[in-house]
Amino acid sequence: MIRVLVVDDEPMVCTHLTTILGTGEITVVGAAHDGAEALEQVVRHRPDVVLLDIRMPGVDGLTALGHIAALDDRPAVVVLTTFDVDAYVLQALASGAQGFLLKSTPPDDLRRLVAVAADGHTVLSPEAARRLAVASSREDRTRETARARIRDLADRETEVLTALGEGLSNAAIGARLHLSEATVKGYVSRLMERLDCDNRTQAGLLAFAAGLVGLDG
C-alpha cells in the first residue's frame, strides 16, 4: 500500500482528497491542517507521499517542506494547490518538492501520479507542466542562465534532461532512447551531479527554464 498524508487548511479539501485517494493501492494515513501538524504527522505515520498545500495560516507549507526535507527518512512531497505557478510553487520545487499538481487534477490522474511520486519520480500533471513552462520562461535572464548551464552537455545528456523535464521515469526514458534502465540511471545521476541539482525535479525545472520542454511538452 502507498501511504499518503494530506495537508490542507480546509477540512473539506482534506475530506475530498481522502475520498478520492482511499481506494486500491493507496491509503490515506492522516490529514493535517497546517505545517506544524503536518510535520508531527509525518514523524508519527511515516507516509510515502505528502500532498502539501503551500498557502496555509500559521506554519505554511514552505516552512513545513524545509523541516520534512531535513528528515533522514523523508517522504516524497508533492505541492498541491489551486493557485497558478508563482514564486511559492517555484520555491517549493527548488527546495526539494517532488512535483506540483493542481487541486483540479482529475481523480484518476491524481491517483496515478501519487503512485508515480511514491516510486521516486517527478510528478507534473499536463496542465501543471504547461503552467510551469510558462513560469520558468518568463524572464529572459533566467532562460539565458539555464541555457548556459546546459551548454556543454552531450546530445544524449540533453535528451535525458529533456525527458526529466517531461516527468518520465527511468524506464520510460530508456524505452524512448533505446537504453537500459541501468544506463539511464547512470545518466541521471551524472546529470544531477554535473548540473548541481539535488533531485530529478530540480533537473526537470532546469529543462523547463532552458526551453528544452515547451508549452506542449
Image (tube, rainbow, N blue to C red):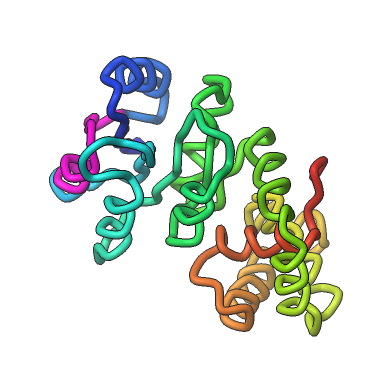
Residue that appears at 50% across and 61% down: 94
Q: Is residue 143 left or right of residue 78?
A: right
Position above or below: 2 against 209: above
Residue 127 sits in quarter: top right
Q: Nearer the viewer, residue 3 or 194?
A: 194
Q: Nearer the viewer, residue 55 or 118?
A: 55
Q: Is residue 139 magenta?
A: no
Residue that appears at 76% across and 60% down: 162
x, y percent for residue 133:
71, 48
Residue that sits furthest to the right in the current view: 155
Q: Nearer the viewer, residue 69 or 149?
A: 149
Position above or below: 126 against 204: above
Q: Is residue 82 left or right of residue 67?
A: right
Q: Is residue 47 left or right of residue 180?
A: left
x, y percent for residue 179:
77, 66
Position above or below: 80 against 106: below
Residue that appears at 52% across and 50% down: 87
Residue that appears at 66% across and 64% down: 206
Residue 26 sits in quarter: top left
Tell me the quarter of the image containing the N terminus: top left
x, y percent for residue 185:
61, 69
How many marks on residues? 0
Q: Is residue 39 magenta?
A: yes
- Numbered range of the magenta stretch: 28-41
x, y percent for residue 198:
49, 71
Tell me the quarter of the image containing the C terminus: top right
Q: Nearer the viewer, residue 78 or 141?
A: 141
